[in-house]
Image: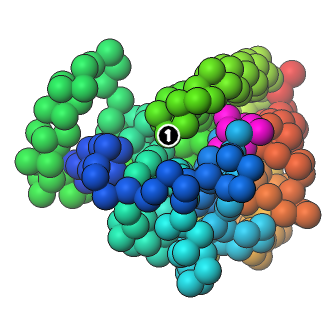
């Protein structure tokens, strides 16, 4: 597996389990009720970056005020919080984040005494992918149907084996690019909003169901749209699409691993040239928030096209769509074109 930038890493199941118990427990140290709502009585939600912001807005609806910590166009992994943002974070009624993606955010959340802190990394199973986008193995907090006591027991067991599982720290964080897994996260977020604001629990449940229905429809479109294609292989500068590839039977070939800013080795470039010829690859994908230089160089050397495949870490004026669903549909169209979908 290619060397990964530590900023991209996700915590082990052990860490995630321990954090979940500490953060979601109803502890005595919490903000006052007055601090958790705005002047109109809406739950104040802080969302770490766009995939979390979208969930908060869709599920919260009119009952929440969502403050995104990562502004449009900012690379989320490099975010450094300003004092004002830290103050807003500490004044939240609920914080929604994905532990391990943004170190500065993780640190601020750890020091905060906000009562409801929801780590998306604990709401679905995370996976490892090898350098070509294939599976290695997975981990996560997904023990379906278990009781709270069993959940705590699993978390304790995970904590005990923390040292043994350090090698799991490089799990792929881009779980939101799989609509099925993103829907699992959505259900967990909805449940936590119900706990944080029980007066509007029915609304959160209704909104969660509506979002899950949209994500299910998106999944069906991807499944049908990519079923018959002339090739299953795509090349991308940013190896963010392991979950998407695994879900729909595709092969992701990353130029430089999970970190889009790292430079590929000459050997990897030569390898990709061979793969492109063998698997009838037509397109090298790059993303909106990172340089397209490497993609264009490889495409030029191999006679391939370039196009955008958006990892949806943020929405900007250059995004091919105004929200998650629209950009994912643009991604689907780009993949269909590149793979020769019939």
Q: Is residue 225 above or below residue 176?
A: above
Q: Residue at x 66, y 68 (%)?
A: 70
Residue 327, percent from left and from top: 82, 45
Q: Is residue 259 above or below residue 219?
A: below
In the image, taking residue 239 as reference, residue 13 lies left or right, namely left
Q: Please tell me which residue lies in front, 194 or 28.
A: 28
Q: Which residue appears farthest toward the bottom when viewing the image? A: 83
Can residue 105 be seen at all in this image of the molecule? yes
As helix, strand or loop, the secondary structure at mark 1 comes to helix
Q: Residue at x 25, y 20 (%)?
A: 147
Q: Tell me the quadrant of the picture where the C terminus can be found.
A: top right
Question: How many marks overall?
Answer: 1
Q: Please tell me which residue lies in front, 262 or 270.
A: 262
Q: Is residue 238 above or below residue 56?
A: below
Q: Please tell me which residue lies in front, 312 or 255.
A: 312
In the image, taking residue 168 as reference, residue 314 lies left or right, namely right
Q: Which SS type dominates the magenta stretch?
A: helix
What is the magenta range? 56-62
Residue 30 within the segment the image draws in magenta: no
Q: Quadrant of residue 193?
A: top right
Identify the residue under disc 1. Answer: 196
Q: Which residue appears farthest toward the left when viewing the image? A: 160
In the image, taking residue 331 as reference, residue 20 lies left or right, namely left
């Amino acid at each position: 597996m290619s060397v990964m930038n530590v900023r991209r890493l996700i915590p082990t199941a052990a860490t995630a389990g321990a954090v979940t118990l500490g953060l979601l427990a109803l502890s005595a140290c919490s903000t006052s009720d007055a601090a958790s709502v705005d002047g109109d009585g809406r739950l104040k939600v802080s969302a770490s970056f766009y995939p979390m912001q979208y969930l908060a807005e869709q599920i919260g609806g009119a009952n929440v005020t969502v403050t995104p910590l990562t502004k449009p166009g900012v690379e989320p992994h490099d975010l450094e919080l300003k004092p004002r943002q830290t103050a807003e974070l500490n004044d939240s009624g609920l914080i929604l984040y994905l532990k391990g993606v943004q170190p500065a955010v993780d640190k601020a959340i750890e020091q905060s005494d906000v009562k409801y802190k929801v780590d998306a990394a604990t709401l679905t199973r995370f996976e490892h992918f090898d350098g070509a986008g294939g599976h290695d193995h997975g981990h996560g907090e997904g023990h379906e149907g278990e009781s709270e006591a069993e959940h705590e027991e699993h978390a304790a067991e995970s904590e005990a084996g923390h040292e043994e599982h350090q090698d799991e720290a490089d799990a792929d964080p881009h779980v939101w690019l799989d609509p099925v897994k993103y829907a699992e996260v959505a259900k967990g977020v909805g449940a936590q909003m119900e706990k944080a604001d029980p007066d509007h629990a029915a609304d959160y449940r209704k909104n969660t169901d509506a979002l899950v229905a949209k994500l299910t429809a998106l999944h069906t479109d991807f499944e049908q749209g990519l079923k018959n294609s002339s090739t299953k292989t795509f090349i991308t500068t940013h190896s963010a699409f392991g979950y998407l590839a695994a879900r729909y039977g595709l092969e992701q070939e990353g130029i430089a691993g999970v970190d889009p800013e790292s430079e590929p080795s000459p050997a990897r470039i030569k390898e990709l040239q061979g793969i492109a010829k063998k698997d009838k690859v037509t397109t090298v994908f790059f993303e909106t928030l990172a340089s397209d230089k490497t993609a264009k160089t490889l495409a030029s050397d191999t006679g391939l096209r370039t196009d955008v495949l958006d990892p949806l870490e943020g929405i900007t004026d250059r995004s091919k769509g105004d929200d998650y669903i629209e950009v994912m549909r643009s991604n689907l169209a780009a993949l269909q074109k590149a793979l020769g979908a019939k």
